[in-house]
Image (cartoon, helix red, strand yellow):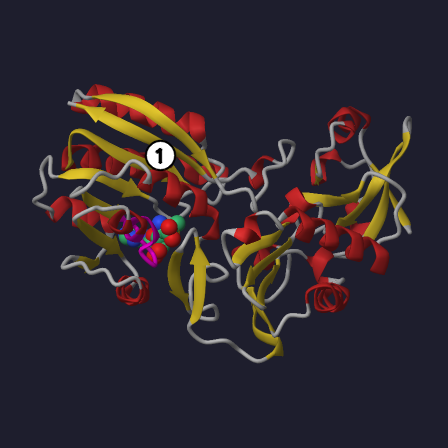
Amino acid sequence: MNKVYIKHSVVPKIRRFTPWIYANEIDSSLEEFQSGEVVALFSKKDGFLGTAYVNPKCAIFARILSFGKEEIGKKFFHNRIKNAIKKREALLKTTNSVRLIHSEADFLPGLIVDKYGESLAIQINTAGMEVFRELILSTLKHLLNPSWIVEKSDVNSREIEGLESHNGTLFGTPVQGFELSENEHTFLVDIEDAQKTGFYLDQRRNRALCASYIKENDRVLDLCCNAGGFGIYALKAGAKECVFVDVSESAIEQTKANLERNELSSESLHVKDVFTFLKEQKYKSSFDMVIIDPPSFAKTKEQAVGAKRGFKHLLMESTKAVKDGGLIGFFSCSHHVGRKELLDIAMEVSHDVKVQYVLLEQMQQDADHPCLINASASFYLNGLLLRVEK
Ligand SMILES: C[S@@+](CC[C@H](N)C(=O)[O-])C[C@H]1O[C@@H](n2cnc3c(N)ncnc32)[C@H](O)[C@@H]1O
């Protein structure tokens, strides 16, 4: 195994279990290494520090697989995947679908695996994980005996890693119209064609929390609704009406199917850009709850400024649409716009629109998407539940 020497100043960061090492933190010549190669990390002064895979094409040069001297082979993947499955056992009592492996936060950087019943949807996002593709698949089959494994590795990060998109069935028989059940709600998921790996599993806990604030006959506005998750929870909790908005036609089709499946209905489903919708809308102080759950506007640090403007606009318009005393669920799924930034934005809107916000809840991704505190990107979903005092 080749050795990579890192700068002495980086050692404390590794001692704190930070799993990423940037290209400018290396004391070796990057060209010596192959994409995806497993290396031993050393500091000239402190000796061995861990085992990582590297990619000289990327700003994140090395991702640490182990802080010990472990062989990265069958036993390593078996133990890591088995541990990840074990941590989800409690959650699987309330749903048939969970994230089983959440990359760095399950100590398998670059690997995502979601379980939908007996099916698995996987994403391999780095050249380093790509090397272990066959081993990962055989371990998943051995531990979970899935009926179908589908790959959904079409994320931008693969391009940065010098990899092509990879989609489609890897094993078994495709499932169409999968019935996802969570907290006694049922959603129909088209795993292969839907966004992400199929469903926004990360919002499970927040859907339930927001619905717990719903009162009989409330009116709800679900912005960027995807398959209708928040709105459907709200209707089942007693809301009289929900208006659904998403720019994606298939998301609204999915919402319609999910309303039907849950024996609910809505007269108001809009395939529309949320900014256009809010500009055109005639709802002034009409809703008891508005959910703002847009896509990740900021995939990079540089995009965060523009993203914050977008968030501010959405909060401003939603504040006008909500009643005095009404609630707003305000979410960001980009770690570049985190909890502090959402609070700062709320403070600015409070000034501009002359309302006060009371912070009722601070929300984050559900427990099957663990947050590793030294890998800030693993802590990507933040939300505020605000009561608007006009
Ligand atoms: C994070 S997901 C919402 C997840 C959803 N709340 C749930 O609980 O499943 C973001 C959604 O925003 C939609 N979207 C993206 N850009 C949009 C836009 N400009 N206007 C409206 N919807 C948009 C996407 O189609 C996607 O369904």
Q: Is residue 219 highlighted in magenta?
A: no
Residue 210, given in percent of the width and then of the height, sits at: 33, 39
Q: Position of residue 309 (x, y in %)?
A: 31, 35
Tell me residue 149's x, y (percent).
61, 71
Residue 323 visible in the shown view: yes
Relative to 144, residue 35 above or below: above
Is 293 situated above or below 273? above
Residue bounds of the magenta highlight: 223-232
Q: Nearer the viewer, residue 87 or 18?
A: 87
Q: Can you say which quadrant of the picture contains the C terminus?
A: top left
What residue occupies the far bottom of the structure in this picture?
A: 173
Q: Residue at x 33, y 38 (%)?
A: 212
What residue is shown with label 1? 308
The structure residue drawn at horizontal position 62% and vertical position 50%, both measured from the top left corner, is 89
Q: Nearer the viewer, residue 172 or 347?
A: 172
Splitting the image into 4 quarters, where does residue 35 fall?
bottom right
Q: Is residue 385 above or below residue 268?
A: above
State whether residue 165 appears in this view: no
**Which residue is located at x 61 percent, y 49 percent?**
88
Left or right: where 118 falls relative to 255: right
Q: In x, y percent, where is residue 93?
A: 55, 52
